[in-house]
Amino acid sequence: MKDNQIKQPKKHPHAEHIVEFARQKASGEREAGWWQWQYQIQSSWRDVAFNSPLFSERGETVYRCIKTKNHPNYDKHEEVRAEWAKVKGKGTHELYFFDEEEPSKGWLQVTVHFPAWFSCCKYEIREIKVEPKLKLIPWDKVPKGVATNFGEFIGVNSLGAAKLVHKNSTGFYFDHRNVEYLRLAPEDEQPWIAAECGSLLAKTASSALDFLDMDVRYVDIAHNQVVAVFKVKGVREGWTDKPELCK
């Protein structure tokens, strides 16, 4: 048989685990209960309940081996310490501890860079849930006629200030306000606004559908003549009219 016809060995995907399991078995450490083998299901770990892990040649199952309380070098925080080392400093997780000698304090966040890992404490890692930042509605695309806290909105001037019209006992008057102080009026205060292009929504109203939740209806005002009307119901998800929520 030629050399190039010699079948080459193929390493088992769990070779290191098989060697370690054999070492534990030969040394008597397994019978002494020093180790616990586990397999991974999604993001959690479960104990191997049978005599030995089923080290499949396909290698689809992920295994690990951890020390038990019977091991002379057992560290109750070994697992969480290793997990914390992976995520520490990334800004995605926080470490919390529970002092079993002072349970009334509850779970507290670890604020020091190097945790002491006290034996009287339990530790757990929590993922930081970051709320996505909201986007401020573009007032220059808000349709004319929408009601705000300062009156009827009629546009934005060249300086970026909102142009508004008010009504009081003496009549109407115009005003300008910084858009940072502008808020949409509640839905029950919003008027029905007619679009200016017959059966279709005006361009301004159509683009506002991206960030405003609007009730759109089509009104038949004469034979074969339909007018689109709309009313602002509020701000769509991901948007806001409050600048402080965008920081």
Image (cartoon, rainbow, N blue to C red):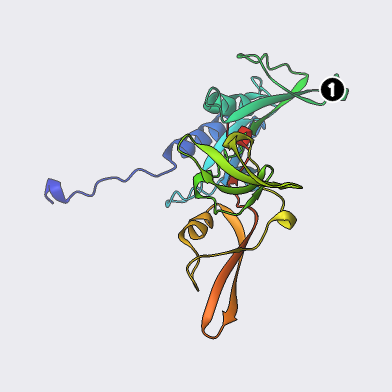
Q: Can you name the residue that lies furthest to the right here?
A: 104
Which residue corresponds to the image point at 58% horizontal and 46% vertical from the top-left? 239
**Residue 52 appears in view:** no
Residue 26: name its quadrant: top right
Give left or right: position of 7 versus 116: left
Q: Relative to residue 162, is residue 79 depicted above or below?
A: above
Q: What residue did someone put label 1 on?
A: 105
Which residue corresponds to the image point at 24% horizontal and 46% vertical from the top-left? 8
Q: Can you name the residue that lies furthest to the front here?
A: 170
Q: Relative to residue 27, is residue 5 depicted above or below?
A: below
Across and down, in percent, residue 106 comes to 82, 26
Residue nearer the viewer, 161 or 80: 161
Across and down, in percent, residue 153 comes to 60, 48
Residue nearer the viewer, 168 or 236: 168
Residue nearer the viewer, 105 or 176: 176
Across and down, in percent, residue 132 comes to 57, 40
Give left or right: position of 192 versus 196: right
Amino acid tagged 1: Lys
